[in-house]
Amino acid sequence: MTTSTIKQEQKAAPGVVNFLVGLAIVVALAFLARWLKGQVYGIENLFGWGVPGKVLEYPIWAALVGLVANYVLKAIRFFEYPKSGFRTELFLKIGLVLLGAGISFKVIITAASGAIIQGVIMVAAVYFFSWWLGGKFGLPDTLRAVMSTAVSICGVSAAIASAGSVLAKKEEITYVTALVIITALPLMVIAPLIAGALNMPEPVAGAWFGGNVDTTAAVVGAGTIYGETAQQIASIVKQTQNVLIGVVAFLLALYFTTVVEGKKEKPNAAIIWQRFPKFVLGFIVTSLIFTFGWITKDASGAIGGMKDWAFCLAFVCMGLELEVAGFKKMGWAPVVVYLIVTIFNTLLALAISWLIFGWLFPVSL
Amino acid sequence: MNVKINEDWLATIIAFVLLILAMVNIIAPSLVKF
């Protein structure tokens, strides 16, 4: 599938029908992913490789069917029409708010305390390492800023937030977004395997996924594959890190307007609230509702089921939204920088999360 | 009419509607079993 064939598609303005068709495709694929998971879950020895079927959790199937559908829809030139229904972020945020309804507020406070320390260390170290390395490879300042924010905070939304602050080019955002998703998908599967090989406790593994994997969807996916506690801690750590987006966007805007462009006026601090991920407030409120004991056992079962459905829809969309067309335009230097920084990020996050969640702020659920 | 709503708030509203429906037993666990 090439860019030119995609461009040949009839482009209609997305409307309600487009959205509903897209949503129907995503829901059908989520059912398919659930069915596939059910087919292999009970198998003790998959393909004779000694791998139990239960390691293939639903995020893997969902992303896989999404990827296949992505290819097929583009091949038959029916990708643009339903595209507005492919909403990774929307489904993910619904799932995260529902996830809060199963986590005690005390756990959030403990995990978030560790996550703030981890977040500040990680964001600062990874951001400046990426900025420095990008400079060594001769990348433009705007691309360095967008890439450094994406790899150090939370992928796509951080890339968009920082791009607004530094007035990056549209193709730089597209490029970094593609890089983030392409590396996040394999990391979602590989990180839990490494954690398993290292025999990491679930809270430590969750903190590692949250501090290391670049997109929130892939963080939740990795946590889900590893275990329920890992899913909860990974989500808390990632959301704590996401809250930093606004602060970094403000500091970047301040640096680029005053230092790079030499202007005297300063950017408005209101950007911190504008970029604040508001669904995190919903996550905190649902956790408080759970902590007050207002959720019965039956309601808890229903909320857990809806949370899994929402995440499954998000993982399907993640596969559907993978876009590699804008990748070839900028050469390989940014890819090399991104991969080196991702390895640095992975190793540093491993050490920091073990130190903080294994020793300083151990979480018991 | 074209009403734009922030995706964060939209997700939060949808999640709370689902939460309340589950809390008042309109959505049963068997209905949404994954």
Image (cartoon, helix red, strand yellow):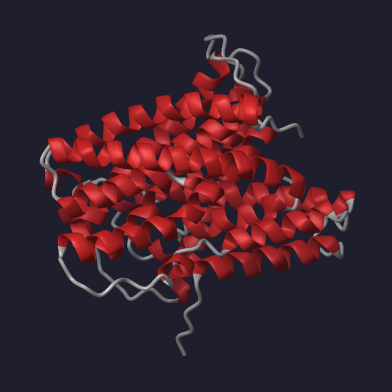
The residue under the point 43% across, 56% down is A245
Residue lying at the far bottom of the rendered structure:
B1
Total labels drawn: 0
Q: Quadrant of the C terminus of chain A?
A: top right
The residue under the point 13% across, 36% down is A137
Q: Is residue B1 above or below residue A52?
A: below
The residue under the point 50% across, 46% down is A217
Q: Is residue B10 visible?
A: yes
Residue A285 location in percent, x, y? Answer: 72, 61
Q: Quadrant of residue A44?
A: top right
Q: Is residue A249 above or below residue A265?
A: above
- Comparing A1 with B25, the one in front is B25
Residue lying at the far front of the rendered structure:
A264
Residue A38 location in percent, x, y? Answer: 65, 33
Residue A246 location in percent, x, y? Answer: 43, 60
Left or right of residue B15, residue A80 in this image? left
The residue under the point 62% across, 52% down is A96
Q: Is residue A167 above or below residue A178?
A: below
Left or right of residue A44, residue A154 in this image? left
- Comparing A121 with A144, the one in front is A121
Q: Is residue A322 above or below residue A200?
A: below
Residue A140 location in percent, x, y? Answer: 13, 49
